Image (cartoon, rainbow, N blue to C red):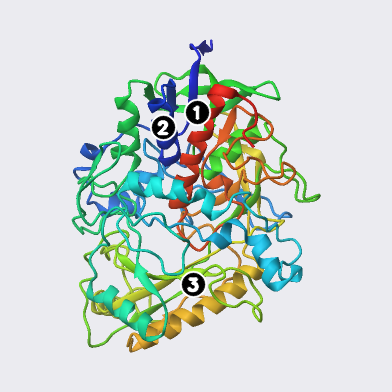
Amino acid sequence: MVNTLPKVDVLTVGVGWAGGIIAAECAKSGLKVVGLERGGDRNTQDWSMIHDELRYAMRYDLMQDMSKETITFRNKLDQRALPMRQLGSFLLGQGVGGSGVHWNGHTFRFLPYDFEIKTKTIEKYGASKIKSNYFIQDWGITYDELEPYFDKFEKTCGISGEPNPLGGKRSSDYPTPPMKNTVITSKFRDTAKKLNLHPFALPSANLSESYKNPDGETINACQYCAFCERFGCEYGAKTSPNITVIPTAKKTGQFELRPHCNVVEIIHDGKKATGVKYIDTIKGEEVIQPADVVVLTSYVMNNAKLLLVSKLGQAYDPATGRGVIGKNYCYQINPGTTGFFENERFNSYMGAGALGQVVDDFNGDNFDHSNLDFIHGGTLVVSQSGFRPIASNPVPSGTPLWGKEFKEKSIKYYTRTINAGFQGASMPHRNNYLDLDPTFKDAYGVPLLRMTYNFTDQDRNLADYLDKQSDRVMKEMGADSIMSAAKLADYNIVPYQTTHNTGGVIMGNDPSISAVNTYSQMWDADNVFVVGASSFPHNSGYNPTGTLGALAYRASEGIIKYSKTGGQLV
């Protein structure tokens, strides 16, 4: 028997950064908010023994249980997709705080070029620069329009940093100073300046000093312990939803957090949603939660899956190019160079997730693409996040991957290695998309999401270019030998690459090619908002969280307005 509960004003599906921001802002405005999270509740006290590389970094204790819910994957349309049975290329988080618990803390703003990428590319290079079957489109909003929301997110988080000399204009400085420089980051910064590049401190959610945000929440100063990515922060020094927006929402008395609630369907009449159906995974019962506004704030994959399962919005069809749900799935590429130093040693076992220096000269349209066979670029980062002993075995090319020589060189180069890595932008392609798998289902009988994805000529050409740039920088840094990233072949979902998945429910100002407007409100159901990196029409050369946070603040503004006036906001 299904248990139907009393209606609430706003319901979020997922309680990470997006869900936490929506909950805090709507609850502060007086709206009654319920947050449904399929994982358990957790906070800093749960991470007192977090410095366990085997449990958290290698066995993924904070991540999604792939035996209950996963995706299927294929490279091409004529292949049969198979389930991803172990976490690999990306790490799907689960639990209150979502990926905001186990992230590194890199908090960038996408470039002005990103939001008007089609217009600006054609204006400068002509329409032929955008190749056929690449679905490049503007976002429907400009950087200047989004800037106040970037500023608000950074002040909520207390971001430590300094302005990007090649980035968009800022209304204010970062709320806290940059993190410390180390021998490694200083070597890169000095070299970049020597090469007439424009280095700046990596914008960091690991804070350089203790900070109280505008909502009165305190974030502590980073201890540089090197346990950030894949770990929660027991000090409360890595900003997360768990120590900022979620407690802010709770303090209003208007927010109810419900963990262990797995939403399986959005209930709607074709024009409006009336609520959701979820499984209480502790009690094993089905529950219907009615709501005036339904907000999907889960990860990229789940936002798209819920809309497809619920038949809300038109599913994308690669044969015709029509439809929007599942369209423009994007990822990133990771070119870069490892440098080996025979006569220098570094304390590379220390660090923090976002301790580093950045060069943006090869990102966006910050360099001339006239004679290049790609658009966009990537951001070059030398960070010191901490080499942990199990996963960190840097050895020169040609070294055996086991045995005496491997052990000797692994030990030798553990403190004699620097990595200069790019995050390369990902452009949407006609054949890269998300839909429902026709065969496989999850533990609740719901079809799995199917990912069809492969690297493109755009990706390969960009990767080759960026590899040359990181090689040049690493040689200038004085490395005795270098090892470049392998050339891109087919995308492989097994080895870890990055958890920067985007698209599937993209935003824009044209309902025929976008699923949501610039307030993240669905064109097809005006009381459904879909908030997250799922709304990105392409992926930039940055970590997505800063832009996600800005869009979430804009969406919350829209939801509050909608609760008063109704109707389409754009």
- Residue 443 is at least partly visible in this image: no
Image side of residue 252 versus residue 93, left or right? left
Q: Quadrant of residue 402?
A: bottom left
Q: Callout 1: few (<14), some (14-19), or many (20+) C-alpha neighbours within 10 Å?
A: many
Helix, strand or loop at mark 2? helix
Identify the residue shown where x is 23% and y is 72%.
182
Q: What's the amino acid at mark 1?
A: Ile
Q: Earlier in the sequence, mark 1 or mark 2?
A: 2
Q: Tell which residue pokes out farthest to the right in this image.
A: 320
Q: Nearer the viewer, mark 1 or mark 3?
A: 1
Q: Is residue 412 above or below residue 542?
A: below
Q: Would you identify the image quadrant in which residue 171 lies?
A: bottom left
The tag earlier along the polypeptide, 3 or 2, is 2
Q: Helix or strand or loop: what does disc 1 sit on?
A: helix
- Foreground: 94 or 554? 554
Indicate the position of residue 143 as horizontal and vertical percent values.
53, 55
Q: Label 3 vs label 2: CA separation?
A: 39 Å
Residue at 40 percent across and 49 percent down: it is 151
Labels 1 & 2 near each other (Cβ < 8 A):
yes
Crowding near the residue tagged with mark 2, few <14, some 14–19, many ≥20 C-alpha atoms within 10 Å: many
Q: Position of residue 90 (x, y in %)?
A: 47, 53
Residue at (46%, 69%) from the top-left corner? 166
Instruction: Determine whether 115 is above or below 530 in the image.
Output: below
Q: For mark 3, give the secondary structure.
A: loop
Q: Which mark is residue 335?
A: 3
Q: Is residue 89 left or right of residue 173?
A: right
- Foreground tag (3 vs 2): 2
